Image: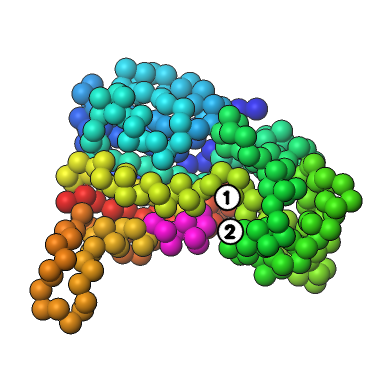
Amino acid sequence: MTFVHYSVLLQETIENLNVKENGIYVDGTLGGGGHALEVVKRLSEEGKFFGIDQDEAAISAAGERLKEYRDKITLIRSNYCNMKSVLAKEGVTGVDGIVLDLGVSSYQLDTEERGFSYRFDTALDMRMDQRQNLTARDIVNNYSEMELFRIIRDYGEDKFAKNIAKHIVAQRCKKSIETTGELAEIIKAAIPAKFRVNGHPAKQTFQAIRIECNRELEVLRDSLDMMMDLLNPGGRICIITFHSLEDRIVKSAFKKAENPCTCPPEFPVCVCGKKSLGKVISRKPILPTEKELNENSRSKSAKLRVFEKR
């Protein structure tokens, strides 16, 4: 299957990135290379672009898509949490822009054997980086009922999280849960029929397990300060989120970077000595247009936030 990923909020991201033709830019979630292509088109011979992705299929697809710009690009198979170290190996200690599109690619969702979707009955996998050991199968069969409840409640925001976790544990006592189809049926049985009207009943739980399997929120939370530090003065970071918890993490990190002062509000002047790293460009998240929503239903929950280094 061809690696396909609709580049959500593409024009808005490129506009806010303020691409300088001789700058250094990084896409930490390269995907199919949609955002990357628009960046490299704007670079002169002096400009440099680094594409990072942990999915081997993404690196291969983006390499093909960007082949006419091969002199300007370096593609690296890694997680964006390693951005600082992988760039250092390339002799880069500062960049002019960073893009993160935290959505799951259409390729990952639509490739049956990757085990991301409840639309197929295939082995439970959900790994974005297939070199890692932990799979969705391990989570479903080995996590305690309380741990399953927590991730389904927090990452899936499903009000039936407790009952879903209970059903999963009851079923695996009979036999291990091996496939996406088995899991989807267990989830469906845990949700009362009258509440199964808005989309597939397994959607939120599958999302929660995927987030846990790939440590998505943990990686984001632990990487934001590092990425903002990497920016050169005037450099910008553009982050597209698809989950309320992701958006909250980004919003909070950007706000803290802009105003890190920890002095009590009654203090007349700042004495903590913490200096602002820059400014938040997007006071409110930038959302997809009606046109984009009509073209790509998966962009529905997308939000773009932008921060500029001082």
Rendered position, 13 above or below 266: above
Q: Which residues are magenta?
A: 242-250
Which residue bears the numbered disc 2? Answer: 155
Residues at marks 1 and 2 touching, judged by CB atoms closer than 8 Å: yes
**What's the residue at 36%, 18% (across, down)?**
70
Q: Which residue is at the front of the view, 118 or 299?
A: 118
Which residue bears the numbered disc 1? Answer: 211
Whether residue 21 sits left or right of residue 226 in the image: it is left
Chosen colour scheme: rainbow
Whether residue 45 sits left or right of residue 220 in the image: it is left
Look at label 2 and name its amino acid.
Tyr
Q: Which residue is at the front of the view, 93 or 71?
A: 93
Rendered position, 164 above or below 137: below
Packing grade of label 1 (10 A; few <14, some 14-19, many >=20) is many
Question: Does the stretch in magenta take in 89?
Answer: no
Residue 205 percent across, percent down from the top left? 68, 56
